[in-house]
Amino acid sequence: MAQSPSSKEKPIRLILIEDHADFRESVSMVLEERGGYQCVGGFSTMEDALEALRGGLEADLVLSDLGLPGMSGVAGIRKVRELLPKARVLVLTAFTDKAKVFAALEAGAHGYLVKAGSASRLIETLEEVLAGGTPLDPKIAGMILQTFRKLSPITDAESLSGRECEVLQLAAKGLTRQEIADALNLSPYSVTEYIKRSFDKLHVRNLPAAVSEAIRRGFLDLS
């Protein structure tokens, strides 16, 4: 898994998929000036990005908008995950409606950030993603919490235990499994088991989807 960049490590290879050239170039400039990041590809459409990936382009991190000309960002995220299974994918978009948020997370995005945020917030979010976390923009987390509640009763078999909620809550805040283990005085193996049980109860296959579903059911509060 990619790690947070430092001066002694190889730069994090970054791909930007954004149809506004000025925004794409400004993000690339900010990250390269920050150090530790190298923009290896900038694309205005998902189709161009996928073509480059199929041609052998490698990256550790992919930042993608959702409102792209041609193939949507949501559809593209699934394909990016297939072509770069070890890369982390972060949504960077102006969209905040619930349908797009959940669609992006269910497609496999590792985090969701709104463009209106500051450069420092972007860098913090990237570091959370690279550390194995699942960061959600505060606007998104609050919207999910307020908008989605489980309408039908949740059976005991599908209710998350207190410990499972604690583990997911810390994972959503960007902690790695080792950090969660240290914080809760557990072994990394136990943390993995709690996450697996959460997946089973929530009927999901990955951590971003587990976090979004747990918020939707009212188990987590990230506001």
Image: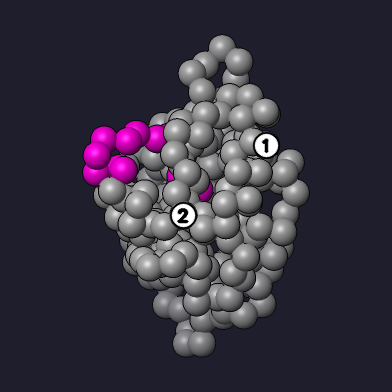
Sort mark 2 into few (<14), some (14-19) or many (20+) by Cα contacts within 10 Å. some
Residue sitting at x 46%, y 54%: 44
Sort mark 1 into few (<14), some (14-19) or many (20+) by Cα contacts within 10 Å. some
Q: Label 1 vs label 2: CA separation?
A: 18 Å
x and y, in percent, of residue 222 in the image: 66, 60
Q: Residue furthest bottom?
A: 152
x and y, in percent, of residue 83 in the image: 27, 45
Q: Is residue 55 visible?
A: yes
Residue designated by label 1: 30
Q: Is residue 106 visible?
A: no
**What residue range appears in magenta?**
52-63
x and y, in percent, of residue 94 in the image: 62, 65
**Quarter of the picture holding the N terminus:** top left
Q: Is residue 48 above or below residue 144?
A: above
Question: Disc 1 or 2, which lies upstream in sequence?
Answer: 1
Q: Nearer the viewer, mark 1 or mark 2?
A: 2
Residue sitting at x 68%, y 29%: 34
Amino acid tagged 1: Val
x and y, in percent, of residue 144 in the image: 60, 72
Q: Secondary structure at mark 2?
A: loop
Relative to 27, 75 lies left or right: left
Corner quadrant of residue 59? top left
Residue designated by label 2: 44
Question: Closest to the observer: 203 or 51?
Answer: 51
